[in-house]
Image (spheres, rainbow, N blue to C red):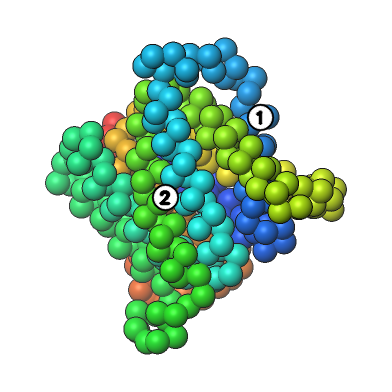
Amino acid sequence: MGIAFALLALFSWGIGDFLIQRSARRFGDWIALFYITAFGTVGLLPFVWRDIPRVFESGGGLPILAGTTIVLLFAAILDFEALRIGKISVMEAVYAFEVPVTLVLSRYFINERLSALETALILSLVVGTMLVSTRSFSINKKAVLEKGVWYAIFATLGMGAVNFLFGVGARETTPLLINWFTSACIAVISLAYLAVRGRASEITRYFRENAPLVTSVGVMDNLAWVAYAYSVTYIPIAIATGISESYIALAAGLGIFVNKERLKPRQFTGLALCVVAVVILSWITGA
């Protein structure tokens, strides 16, 4: 089940990032973030309302939920801004490094030990993702100064931490509760920020004009996080992250078959490496 949920997160994030880029460019970072989190708040409430009072009891998981919310808020804004101003193929190549960040945190803080084979397979996913999503490995001034790269670098560090915190929080509370709590808090903060900036009225106007886009990005991004949260309750956080982050390679694969894009032999090799690594991980974890 853990691998299945991680694969669902993979597919959902693959589509979700594309929709987030479109949303951020059309509405701005904060309105796009509000739509996604408001959708999660309303959609998940019927499934978690009985559990909400327990959060504020001793041992209810409030510290991990609050900490995850704070880190996710800053990481999401950086992520959205990187996608808004940059090329998605370039940003996704940077995002591949969320995996080693999460792996280090999992080992250091919760002593989540992986076998040598599991570690090698996760690193293979990172390498494969980089091979697929990076058009050229030549280093020059233009590449270093690509728009959005610095936002993406800091977003990657933040999201790597979020992956770890989400995993711990999903285990201490429930996968649905951590999703609802983070969404509700960020939705309130986003709405307050927009109100202070005098942009709250834009929320309803943009929704009327772009209801399909708002609904699609709300469904896909929340589905991805829910699936990821469930996956880490079955398998190690590092493995769940390694598999789900391979959505970058999936996007390239869709480009081959749907958009008839031509990839270099190196990119085909990277795609094959990701597929093989996921299959072997599925087998050795008993999924």
Q: Is residue 255 left or right of residue 111?
A: right
Give the labeled residue for mark 2. 159
Q: Is residue 9 visible?
A: no
Q: Quadrant of the N terminus?
A: top left
Which amino acid type is marked by label 2? Met
Q: Is residue 266 visible?
A: yes
Q: Position of residue 128 (x, y in %)?
A: 34, 62
Q: Position of residue 192 (x, y in %)?
A: 67, 42
User: Separation of disc 2 and disc 1 at Cα?
Assistant: 23 Å
Q: Earlier in the sequence, mark 2 or mark 1?
A: 1
Q: Secondary structure at mark 2?
A: helix
The residue nearer to you, when weighing 194 against 82, is 194
Q: Secondary structure at mark 1?
A: helix
Give the labeled residue for mark 1. 43
State whether residue 152 is above or below residue 33: below
State whether residue 75 is above or below residue 179: below
The residue nearer to you, when weighing 271 against 192, is 192
Dot 1, how many residues are within 10 Å of its Cα: few (below 14), some (14-19), or many (20+)? some
Which amino acid type is marked by label 1? Gly
